[in-house]
Amino acid sequence: MTDAHPLALALAAQADAQINELARARGLGRDTFDTLVHKATGLLEFAGDDATGTADIIRDHRGVLRAVARLIDDPAADEIPPSNDEVYAAVLDITELDSITSALGRVGSDRLLRHLIGDDPAGDRRDRLGLSFAAVCARAGLPVEIDPGPSGEAGVVGVTLDRWPIAAAAAVPLAPGELEVESRRAGEALRRSGRPGLIVLEAGMLLDWSPINVADDATAVAIMNERLDALMIGVRDRVADAAGTDHAFGLVLHATLPALNAASRRMLFAECLRAVNLCDADDPRIHGFQTFITALGKADAG
């Protein structure tokens, strides 16, 4: 197996785009929370009154967001102030779910509904990551399929690279010891899809999630990406060995990481995506992987 190639230069535009976005941010105000309440309500209306599972979590999140909005208007309001963790979870979850429905349209929303009312927590986690990845690809201008291949299983989506249909299978370990198990399951899912493709690994539970204290937002994003790069290099061979490279030719790591800007005292979160090839550098599939990296880089820079 060849040495890992993080392709840091190809993904540098992503970090620049995040830095520019954060520099324009003015913090979370009443308008932000009102918007998130509206988005949460839209998700629940789509799911239906009887929806359970993740829909229950969305209801809780909406209550948290409403409470914050009221307390911003009137700090003496008759509301129990939510904890920081509750607020962060509400903002991140609602933003991500709304991003999926916005990018993928009705087809993605239909599959998201199955996720919202599902009774398979592990499958739901994989499906949500798969749909989030499909949304990223759609925003990058890549054609996506929500139910590719004969299996149509949770966490598997289709992406087309220069008329080459591939699949992406999600892996969501909840602890470091689950990395090989989830990677193996994702590799098997790619085989069942009948397509070569990517393993999309949720790296949040594999990293130290404690917020980093930084002087400015640009430093925060740079450190976040360095953390993910280091993890990517460390797990690449383990993922390749567990999943096999007969179908899996690339690995994409996803994590949303927190930081505290010491100057503004503002908590910020950055969604980071990093990618590395699992196949050898002379493998014919490497061209398709580079096409994927280029598309994401252009989208992030735009």
Image: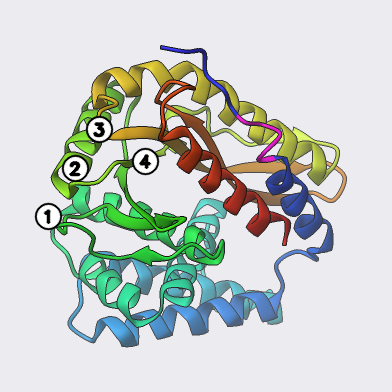
Name the residue type under label 1: Ser
Q: Earlier in the sequence, mark 1 or mark 4?
A: 1
**Observer-nearest residue: 82 or 161?**
161
Residue denoted by label 4? 198
Mark 3 nearby-residue class (10 Å; few <14, some 14–19, many ≥20): many
Which part of the image, by quadrant, shows the C terminus?
A: bottom right
Which part of the image, by quadrant, shows the N terminus?
A: top left
Span of residues in magenta: 7-11
Name the residue: 29% across, 51% down.
Answer: 125
User: Label 1 vs label 2: CA separation?
Assistant: 8 Å
Question: Horizontally, is 166 left or right of 259 in the view?
Answer: left
Residue denoted by label 1? 151
Q: Earlier in the sequence, mark 3 or mark 4?
A: 3
Please identify, in this view, whether the residue under mark 1 or under mark 3 is nearer the observer.
Answer: 1
Name the residue: 50% across, 59% down.
Answer: 136
- Label 3, secondary structure: give it: helix
Residue denoted by label 3? 182
Name the residue type under label 4: Leu
**Observer-nearest residue: 178 or 59?**
178
Name the residue type under label 3: Glu
Q: Quadrant of residue 154?
A: bottom left
Q: Is residue 2 above or below residue 156?
A: above
